[in-house]
Image: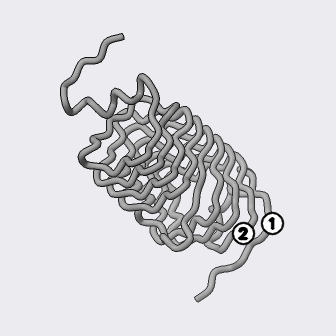
Amino acid sequence: MSLPYIKDHTFHQADCLNKPLEKAEYEYCQFLNIDMGSADLSGFSFTDCTFVGCNLSMSRISKTSFKSIKWKGCKIMGLKWDECNPFLFSVSFEDCMLDLSIFYGVRLKKTSFVRSSLKETDFSEADLEHAVFEDCDLAGAVFDGSNLSQCDFSTARQYIIDPEQNYIKNAIFSWPGVSGLLVKYGIRLVD
C-alpha cells in the first residue's frame, strides 16, 4: 500500500487545527509553527523538508523516514530516533531543543547540531564521524561506544566523554570543554 504523495506545500498551524497531518510521503514541504507534540507520525516519509518553530516532543516516529531534513527552532524532545527508518536518514538541527532524545546506534555522519540543547540525550553506539556540535549544551548526554572521530566539540559545553569507551581519533576539543574527557579520572584542573 503506497502513501499519498504531497510535494512543494507549506503547512501552518491553522492547517492542522481541525485534523491531524495526513499519513503521507512529503517532499520539498515546509512545516511552520505546528504543534505535533505526542503525535503518531509512524510510517510517514519526509524528504527534503524543513521544520521551523515546530513542536514534535514525545511524538512516535517508528519507521518514519527523514531524508535530508532541516530542523530550525524546533522543540523535539524525547524522540526515539533509533526507531526511524535508517535508509538515507539525514538531518540537521539549528536552535533546537533535543533534550532526552535517543540516537542509540543511529548513523549521524556529518550531522550538524547548531546552538541546540542536547541535555541527557543518548548517543550510545551512534556513528557521529565528522559531526559538528556548534555551541551546544550536552549536559548529561551519554556517549558509550560512539564513533566520535573527527567530530567537532570545539564550542560545545558540559559534555562528559570517556576516551576509553568511545572512538575519538582526530576529534576537535577546546578549553575548558576538554576537561569533560578527564572526569572519570577524578582529576582537578586549575588555571
Total number of numbered labels?
A: 2
Image quarter of residue 190? top left
Q: Residue at x 57, y 48 (%)?
A: 112
Dot 1 crowding, Cα within 10 Å, few <14, some 14–19, many 20+: few
Q: Secondary structure at mark 1?
A: loop
- In the image, is 151 to the left or to the right of 121? right
Please say if 44 is above or below 96: below
Dot 2 crowding, Cα within 10 Å, few <14, some 14–19, many 20+: some
- In the image, is 23 to the left or to the right of 105? right
Mark 2 residue type:
Glu
Quarter of the figure with the N terminus = bottom right
108 and 130: which is toward the camera: 130
Please say if 160 is above or below 167: above
State the image coordinates of residue 8 (x, y, percent, origin top left): 80, 66
Image quarter of residue 103? bottom left
Circles 1 and 2 in contact, beta carbons < 8 Å: yes
Quarter of the figure with the C terminus = top left
Q: How is the image coloured?
A: one colour
The residue carrying mark 1 is 8
Q: Residue at x 69, y 69 (%)?
A: 26
Q: Which mark is residue 27?
A: 2
Q: Which mark is residue 50?
A: none
The first of marks 1 and 2 along the sequence is 1
Q: Residue at x 44, y 41 (%)?
A: 99
Outermost residue toward the front in this view: 170
